[in-house]
């Protein structure tokens, strides 16, 4: 994730950059006179800043790296608007003056603005079974609303998943000037291609369910889901794979049995996963991770090579903690 870190390092809220961002926001968004900027630690996909206006209105400004395409960000903002209409608590995006959601930010970034939703992230190592159970319920409800409210698509704007994976591998071989994939054994990549041919559930996927994307209130109730810029069409259970790996670790490289059961059983209570084949979902999770890493949207997770080498093992591990 070298390029992303360099971009973050070069941007800071000194007086000059504050003045620049203030001017861009004023020209792009009708927020009123801005009186305060404050850098925030929210999510992992964008640099974020809290803004307060003279009218005491608060917003969050997101500066996404240029690797996040405008079309994807606009689709994400539209989805969040639908969620708000259906009482699913998210931070809805504010339209720019021209009617779109994305405006040009500093250093080639994509600038977006949302309303403020109070809450803070609970570190993964502090998650309890109750916390993880809330995540399972929220994911199931979220996937149901996405299926009901957003139009179905058969292909991504950049082609199908197989074509996108091939493009990711070609960018690695071409030494593209963005964070590229490491070299994986040919047999592992070949097996992944085979998994992508299996029949699979289809629907909208959040794309990065980690502790940083989940905001809780003071009573540890899950308030909202953030970090929506990787919303894509795929297998919704990719989000459950994400949650399983990021929230159900016992801290020793293994799985916390109680938290894993809490995640799967709570999800199943609203959207059944009984007798669901998990191998296609794992395959699509692996492929999407490789695609996003090749574009520099996010780094590969720790231990990715292990799961690429044995996707069936990960699928069996998830299934073993679900309802019978």
Image: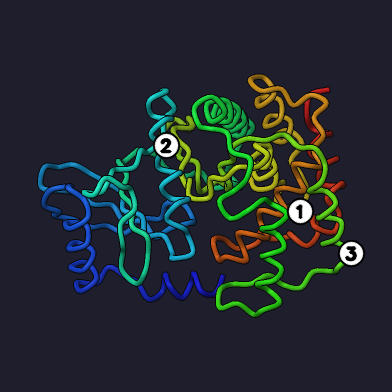
Of circles 3 and 1, the one toward us is: 3
Q: x, y (%) of residue 251?
A: 70, 51
Do the residues bearing badges 2 and 1 touch, measured as CB atoms within 8 Å? no
Do the residues bearing badges 3 and 2 touch, measured as CB atoms within 8 Å? no
Circle 1 residue? 253
Q: Residue at horizontal 69%, vertical 47%?
A: 245
Please tell me whether mark 2 sits on a helix, a strand or a loop: helix
Query: How far apart are the two marked residues, 2 and 1, measured between alpha carbons?
Result: 35 Å
Q: Of label 2 and label 1, which has the lower sequence position?
A: 2
Q: Residue at horizontal 60%, vertical 59%?
A: 292
Circle 2 residue? 80
Query: How far apart are the two marked residues, 3 and 2, measured between alpha carbons?
Result: 40 Å
Q: Can you tell which mark lies on residue 187?
A: 3
Q: Of label 3 and label 1, which has the lower sequence position?
A: 3
Please tell me whether mark 3 sits on a helix, a strand or a loop: helix
Q: Of label 3 and label 2, which has the lower sequence position?
A: 2
Instruction: Tell me the quarter of the image containing the N terminus.
Output: bottom right
Left or right: where 13 falls relative to 124: left
């Amino acid at each position: 994730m070298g390029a992303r870190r360099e971009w973050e390092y070069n941007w800071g809220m000194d007086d000059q950059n504050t003045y620049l961002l203030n001017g861009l926001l004023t020209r792009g968004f009708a927020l009123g006179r801005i009186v305060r900027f404050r850098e925030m630690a929210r999510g992992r996909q964008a640099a974020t800043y809290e803004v307060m206006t003279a009218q005491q209105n608060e917003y969050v400004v997101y500066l996404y790296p240029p690797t996040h395409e405008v079309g994807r960000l606009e689709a994400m903002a539209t989805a969040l608007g639908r969620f708000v209409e259906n009482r699913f608590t998210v931070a809805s995006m504010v339209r720019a003056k021209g009617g779109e959601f994305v405006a040009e930010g500093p250093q080639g970034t994509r600038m977006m603005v949302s309303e403020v939703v109070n809450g803070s992230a609970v570190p993964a190592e502090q998650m309890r079974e109750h916390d993880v159970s809330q995540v399972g319920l929220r994911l199931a409800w979220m996937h149901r609303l996405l299926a009901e409210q957003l139009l179905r698509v058969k292909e991504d704007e950049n082609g199908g998943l197989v074509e996108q994976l091939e493009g990711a591998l070609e960018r690695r071989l071409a030494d593209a000037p963005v964070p590229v994939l490491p070299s994986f054994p040919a047999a592992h990549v070949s097996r992944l291609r085979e998994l992508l041919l299996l029949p699979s559930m289809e629907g909208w996927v959040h794309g990065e369910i980690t502790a940083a994307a989940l905001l809780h209130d003071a009573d540890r109730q899950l308030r909202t889901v953030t970090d929506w810029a990787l919303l894509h069409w795929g297998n919704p259970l990719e989000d459950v794979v994400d949650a399983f790996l990021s929230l159900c670790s016992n801290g020793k490289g293994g799985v916390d049995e109680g938290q894993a059961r809490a995640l799967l059983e709570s999800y199943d209570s609203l959207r059944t996963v009984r007798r669901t084949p998990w191998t296609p979902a794992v395959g699509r999770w692996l492929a999407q991770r490789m695609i996003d890493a090749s574009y520099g949207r996010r780094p590969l997770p720790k231990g990715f090579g292990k799961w690429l080498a044995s996707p069936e093992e990960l699928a069996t591990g998830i299934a073993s903690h679900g309802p019978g």
